[in-house]
Image (spheres, rainbow, N blue to C red):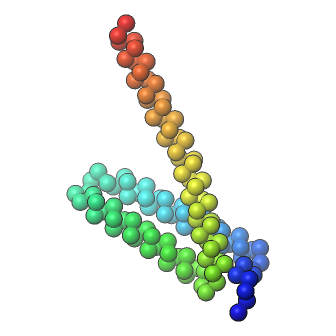
Amino acid sequence: MNPNIFHMSAGEMGTALLIGAACSIVFMYLLWETIQLLPRVKHRGLFLFVSMALRIFLLLAVMILFSGENAGRFILIFCGFVIMRLFILRFTRFGAYNQVQEKQLQKSFGKKKGKR
């Protein structure tokens, strides 16, 4: 048994990171679809729980499938997932923040104009 869990080529490491990034994109897309379907669902709590459980199961299944018995590859896939998830959240959070901020500014200016 090799004590170095990251004993693999740079290509294998890059592939593992890309697999993790792809898992993150799919995970976030399925979360987006869940949120879009939420207003039309009767039992929202159950729907959210089942959706979360399925997304996590899918993520773990893909991570285990592609990592095989290599713990280093599993860690790299997880790191790729986390990095892409943080990137997606940062990218979308600023867009949402700017939209909310603009709406609040429009409301506050509209109220001030109406009072004068």
The residue positioned 70% from the left and 81% from the top of the image is: 5
In the displayed image of the protein, which residue is found farthest to the right? 9
Which quadrant of the figure has residue 16? bottom right
The residue positioned 57% from the left and 47% from the top of the image is: 91
Q: Quadrant of the C terminus?
A: top left
Q: Is residue 2 left or right of residue 70?
A: right
Which quadrant of the figure has residue 10? bottom right
The residue positioned 52% from the left and 45% from the top of the image is: 93
In the displayed image of the protein, which residue is found farthest to the front? 3
Q: Is residue 45 left or right of residue 7?
A: left
Residue 46 at least partly seen: yes
Q: In the rendering, at what x and y percent does residue 43 appear?
A: 23, 60
Q: Quadrant of the N terminus?
A: bottom right
Which quadrant of the figure has residue 4? bottom right
Q: In the rendering, at what x and y percent does residue 82 appear?
A: 58, 62
Identify whether 7 is placed above or below 99: below
Q: In the rendering, at what x and y percent does residue 22 appear?
A: 58, 65
Identify whether 64 is placed above or below 76: below
Q: In the rendering, at what x and y percent does residue 103 appear?
A: 43, 29
